[in-house]
Amino acid sequence: MSTTSRLSGFKDSTIAQRRETVAANSGVDPAEMGVFDPAGGLGVESANHMVENVIGTLAVPVGVATNFTVNGIDRLVPMATEEPSVIAAASNAARMARVHGGFHTSHTGPVMQAQVQLLDVADPEAARLRILEAAPEIIAAADSLDPMLVEFGGGVRDLTVRILPTRAGTHVVVHLVVDVRDAMGANAVNTMAESVAPRLAEIAGGRPLLRILTNKADLRVVRARAVFDKDLLGGAEVVDNIVAASAFAEADPYRAATHNKGIMNGITAVVLATGNDTRAVEAGCHSHAVGSDGRYTALSHFEKTPDGNLSGVLETPMAVGLVGGATKVHPVARTTIKILGVETATELAEIITAVGLAQNLGACRALAAEGIQRGHMSLHARTIAATAGATSSELDLVVRRLVDDSNIRAEHAQEILAELRSGR
């Protein structure tokens, strides 16, 4: 089947037409698109099996980012977000990269780590060596807990030991390094850590306390790069301004926090849409933004190419999965995975990272070219108009007036509606 993510006129289509177009260009059965109706998505009974004390569900808008080419393959990317301009900005940035081959990615593999904290160890240095000597035994014991993971090519890849001075004394911390394949990996590595902790404590001559994964997934890193066309960006001055804005974020933690938030606007929206753990991914990304010098900095970097285009790169941990959790339980998540057409967790992680880079570029371009408010508030005006009670036939007129008046406030929208309805 021939598919494309370049969907002309997509934003001007009706919701029903968009669903038909997405189904036709993703291979998803059109009937399955019904899960995007609130009545066809996550029901209260299903939600009751997912978390405790359920009283209902909260709907979040799900849109589709277009124009994405990742490693030579066109992708339609579902994104769940309540923030206006995010999906439009990502789609527009992907269009600017598309003419230069789209996004290219690489990765370190789906490797997660669990930590076992050992206390009251009398001889930490010697204990470290005793544990390393017993590594084959510990690794074999951990692998025996998940034979299916091992059968699919995963399992424990290494065991490391750290001696950690703390205000509560010296701790010995053991890391199990585990290839979790297509899982996010929390359950697998936590089970392993809990099982081997008593034996590790016995070897060290101490007692175990915490036995849990770390969300600092610095062994599960994805890198994305793209070249954004200078003419589509708005010319050489805009390119130079984005480079300067990037340098600002690299040098200043105050700017970096907002710069990285722009990246997470894209990343979190895809992570949420696919039923993955947004908090785990966000923790991993932000911890990765702290360099070896302890300073928080930008996750992405932009540079001018020799021919004057803009080169963008993003490197960040990306702990997402396709098996277990809401990815299999939530009906919307199941369908978004089908729309994406991914077969492995790493493939999903690569697309998510590409979206993060695209979203970041979109925000930087808005800041460097026209200010963030113009594009963002134009979309926000639709929310304001709808909140004020504008009907479908009134919406565009109210939005246009809000933007033209540079007064995007609910009370002004109500004034405009009153004028329209009085016939003046």
Image (cartoon, grey):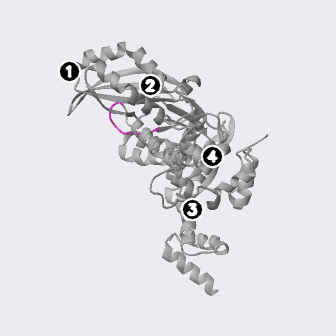
Residue named by callout 2: 177
Given this view, does label 3 or label 4 mark the residue nearer the observer?
4
Residue 82 painted magenta: no
Q: Which residues are magenta?
A: 292-299
Residue named by callout 1: 122
Given this view, does label 1 or label 3 mark the residue nearer the observer?
1
Label 1 CA crowd tier, 10 Å (few <14, some 14–19, many 20+):
few
Which tag, 1 or 3, sits closer to the chain's start?
A: 1
Location of the N terminus by quadrant is top right
Residue type of the residue flagged with mark 1: Ala
Residue at figure coordinates x 42%, y 43% from the top left = 249
Q: Is residue 155 above or below residue 15?
A: above
Left or right: 112 in relation to 100: left
**Which residue occupies the foreground of this view, 4 or 111?**
111
Q: Position of residue 342 (x, y in %)?
A: 65, 37
Residue at figure coordinates x 54%, y 41% from the top left = 357
Q: Is residue 135 above or below residue 329?
A: above
